[in-house]
Amino acid sequence: MRVDHLIPRKSGHPQVEFGVAGDISGKRTGDLALDALAALATTADGNHFFADCVRLLASSFGVAHAFIASCADESRSTISTQAVWSNGELAENFSYELAGSPCFDVLAHDLVFVPSGVAEAYPMVRWPIERGVESYCGAVLVAPGGEKLGVVVLADTKPMVRDPRLHRVLGHYAQRVALELHRQPAQRELLLAASVFEQSPQGIMITDAQHRIRKVNAAFTAITGWRQSEVLGRRASMLSAGRDAPGLRAEMQEALDAGNIWVGELWSRRRDGEVYPENRTVVAVKGDDQRLQHYVSTFSDISAEKFAAERIHRLAHYDATTELPNRVLLQDRLLHAINRVVRGGGRLALLFLDLDGFKLINDTYGHSAGDEVLRLVGVRLTSRLRKADIVARVGGDEFAVVLSDVEHDNDVQTTCDQLLEVITEPYDLSGQASRVTTSIGIAMFPEDGSDVQTLLKHADAAMYRAKESGKNRYAFYEPEMNQRAEERLQLTRQLRRALDRGEFSLCYQPQYDLASGRLVGVEALVRWRDADGNDVPPSLFIPVAEDSGLIVPLGNWVLKHACQQAQQWREQGLEFGRLSVNISGRQFNEEGLQAAVAAALQATGLPADRLELEITESWVMEGPFRAEHQMRLLHEMGVNLVIDDFGVANSSMAYLKRFPVQKLKIDRSFIRDILSDTDDAAIVSAMIAMGHSLGLRVVAEGVETSEQSAFLRGTGCDEVQGYLFGRPVPYDELNILLLYSPTLSPS
């Protein structure tokens, strides 16, 4: 031991030695202590290491007390113990002020030895007095960078003899303890990070640069239902519900590639299949070489927040009594409907309804009964309209209806007839059957107004004219439309008589394979020549048949007679491919459709695989789940199915994949301008590619020019139909085609 100096604390007080331990060869006690330290260094860490150190130091040198302490704050005014050995056992940690203590001198001089009289040498420090400490030896703890971290101390209740072995061993322990103290903050940071990761209420997912999942936390499992072992190595896209806006994922990746943090809402799917909205934050993590290492995603289930937001929105935009849209939302939706019509063409109708005699209901039965009538009126209106139509309560006893995609005036008239009928049905109020009627005013877009307020004003005016005319009726804003309403009623009567008299006939239009030119099918089309010998256009009588329900018997007649003709061709050895028959939406929704098809096939002998049924896309998408069920029943019979007028109803790819269909028939409206409208050309090309990706054949109808045919051939369209290849003709004229010209010319 080399002592730098020996300084008396005060006259007559004990001496305190300050210095640095020398390198003196160890004796047995020191060697044992160092051996124990070496073993300890490989078997313990952290607080266990500190506890074992103080225990070994105290037992090796036979002292009562040993402790390790570190500076408790940046000002270095307080010191706190990390482990305390006292009188043969671990004791509780404690803290004390450094000023005036032996540990203060250790930090200043690296090593302090007080052989006796500690309490007298340091009278301001309580812990030596409380523990009866007589002697003290302390060494400084120095980090690898030179920072003084704390002290390691031996203390005893009897005087110590200055022994170089003590100083040497204490110095070695101090070095190892200092390393551990230096390491602990980083370790604590890691432990803290791990704790935050695991305890975070937000789901956390760490993926590699290829988006393969590497680690998830407990909240991830709680939110998604997936355990870490089930998702490791799988792509993060497994969580997607497939309902995000098109291009959103690409936007996210673009932001991350640019070094930005991406924050947004996504739709995800839990392990049990439930879809939920989440708020997600994604960060790209790069290494020291600036190469991408990981993506860290944090997310939370925002179903509750969305529910709250939707509730607030509902209170502001919906009527509390009927749960229908209120006037504010009506105007917004009407504007949206107008803009859609402006972009795509067509017409819409605004119906303004006022209940007749509603005040009497309120006065007789009370306002609660009046509210019940209003609620039931809302239910009845909604039940008689399409999903695309809008029903709203605009105030008091007034309702409004927006009819979208109106092709003919009689569409509006039919709907008004239905609404008048359903509203006049009795209402059970306190056991009494009560009735109300309604007066309806109709304003058409664009004829009666080009904006929301004008349409509302004109529909309201028409409603008052209906009331003035006797109530329980409807009136168009333009008087001449009343004449067309009468014409529609007259046409319905004529249509019913035509069915009874057998005034309908069938024509057949050929369909060709575009690549080979081979005839692959014929489509049956109904025609009507009335009793006066006039041909009634299908565009005029088919909508009336749909609205009146006569389309069902008419459709069954077409199906039976077309199958009969097709079987006759088979028996004559004339190859026609497949027979294609249109099924109306009303027919398609009938429970008896399967039975009607089976009856037609059985009665005629036509094999099921020679029959194709065409169902318009708009009707299919009105009720996709019911449509799928109906299609599967028909498919199980062996009948082929075609989605007709494809492209006008924005079918979901997910539904198309589920429907057991064999073909898509592109609507003629897209073919008409395919050479002059780049949008139509792109849409047709995309529909053909999509159909092929689903394993479906694609048919183009309405092909009228060789240029259109050449374009379709270039895009890979499978089949074509139109005036270029053959007009609809009666069966006897088609017989000639089947006999002599069953293929197209090479051009």
Image: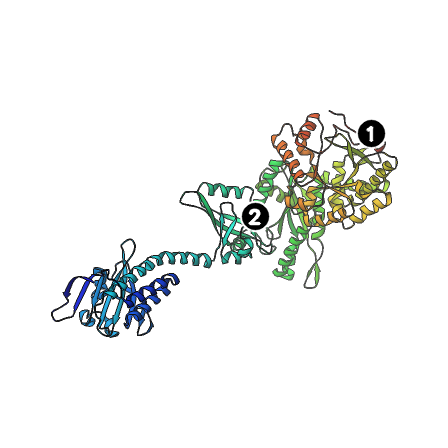
Residue 583 placement (x, y as % from top left): 76, 42
Q: Nearer the viewer, mark 1 or mark 2?
A: 1
Residue 152, picture quadrant: bottom left
Residue 707 placement (x, y as % from top left): 68, 26
690 lies left or right of 281:
right
Residue 62 placement (x, y as % from top left): 28, 72
In the displayed structure, would residue 669 be above or below residue 69? Answer: above
Task: Name the image quarter holding the N terminus.
Answer: bottom left
Q: Which residue is mark 1?
A: 737
Q: CA distance from mark 1 to mark 2?
A: 57 Å
Q: Secondary structure at mark 1?
A: helix
Q: Amino acid at mark 1?
A: Leu
Residue at 41% x, 58% y is 191
- Can you see residue 32? yes
In the displayed structure, would residue 176 be above or below residue 136? Answer: above
- Can you see residue 493? no
Q: Which residue is mark 2?
A: 329
Task: Name the image quarter holding the C terminus.
Answer: top right
Residue 197, picture quadrant: bottom left
Coloring scheme used: rainbow
